[in-house]
Amino acid sequence: MLARKAVLAALGLFCLLPIAACAADDSGDQSEEYEDEPVGETNDELRSAVSCKEKTATAYDDGKPFSITTITVGGKLVSKPTGHAFLKMQAAADKAGVRLSLTSGFRTMAEQQALYRCYKTKKCNHGNLAAEPGYSNHQNGLAVDLSTSTWLAKNAKKYGFARTVPSESWHYEYFGGRDPGGPCTNAAQPSGDDTDVGELAPEKLDWVGITEDSTYARQVPLKVKPVDAAVVKVIYRSGNFELGTSTDAAGNFPVSYTFSAIGERTLTAEGYDSTGKKISVNAVDVTITN
């Protein structure tokens, strides 16, 4: 995706610089930012939630601007490929009993400028070292801060992630290149597996009472009408978080869910047949308010 000077042998990439240089931005004495270690974790709903509303953002690599497409994962803005790769890693961590959280993602120029001012004035953000705007790892669309664990350290590279700041065990970057596919995959894009929205026919399910880009209070009645009688069960999700399951076809598979956090969400309804095979996924973008 980017021509990086930092390349990691563990992922089959190469670097002609010492390992310390490979792990940091090449921007003089601001090359390595330091941040406070992330503490605490968000609740599971927000931790795993996704908003597929795409936004175009300006990213930077060694001061050079370029455009990326972002989505929101766990309440954090991330590039689409990085977000999808993280969600796959998070799902695997969940199966292993590890609650993997994304604590920081993509930074806009304005956000990096604010951190840099804090570093220069020592009047905010504890005066932490911050890279010059345009040279931060968090502006390249690849960098994320994650809740640390032994599982993450052992498995991150399987999903294309690698540590790039030796002093920060929570700082990883996505070097997988392509978008592995996920809940925000469009039908025209390549996708990774049959959990991706674009792989399955949405016309088998119609949302009832919920429309695209609408606003709802925290308590949301979820319903979908099956156009195909083969659908016997529906599971509702936002990202990796399950909102509820229904087998009541006569009632349009109703589930009432009360959201604990406001913000944009992409809700997906997954339809399953009697053999347990997923045969349809239909998604809708909404905003949850107080």
Image (spheres, rainbow, N blue to C red):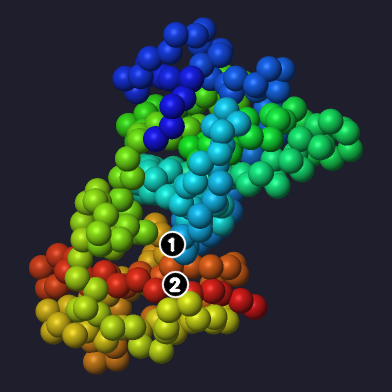
Residue under the point 20% across and 79% down: 204
Closer to us: 3 or 175: 3
Q: Is residue 53 above or below residue 3?
A: below
Residue behind mark 1: 52
x and y percentages locating residue 150 in the rendered image: 46, 29
Residue, far bottom:
250
Q: Residue 81: x and y, percent?
A: 39, 45
Q: Is residue 267 visible?
A: yes
Left or right, 128 with respect to 289, comes to: right
Give the numbered dot on residue 285.
Answer: 2
95 left or right, relative to 107: left
Other-residue count near label 2 (Cα within 10 Å), few / some / many at <14 / 14–19 / ≥20: many
Q: Position of residue 216 (x, y in %)?
A: 54, 82
**Amino acid at circle 1:** Cys
Q: Residue at x 40, y 31 (%)?
A: 175
Q: Mark 1, residues whose alpha carbon is within 10 Å: few (<14), some, or many (≥20)?
A: many
Residue type marked 2: Asp
Residue 201 vertical position relative to residue 240 in the rendered view, above or below: below
Q: Secondary structure at mark 2?
A: strand
The quadrant the C terminus occupies is bottom right
Question: Would residue 39 be seen by someone viewing this image from the given angle?
Answer: no
Closest to the observer: 104 or 188?
A: 188
Mark 2 and 1 residues: CB-CB less than 8 Å, in contact? yes
Quick one: label 2 or label 1, which is nearer the N terminus? Answer: 1
Residue 260 pos. (x, y %)? 58, 69
Q: CA distance from mark 2 to mark 1?
A: 7 Å
Q: Quadrant of the N terminus?
A: top left
Residue drawn at x 41%, y 89% is: 209
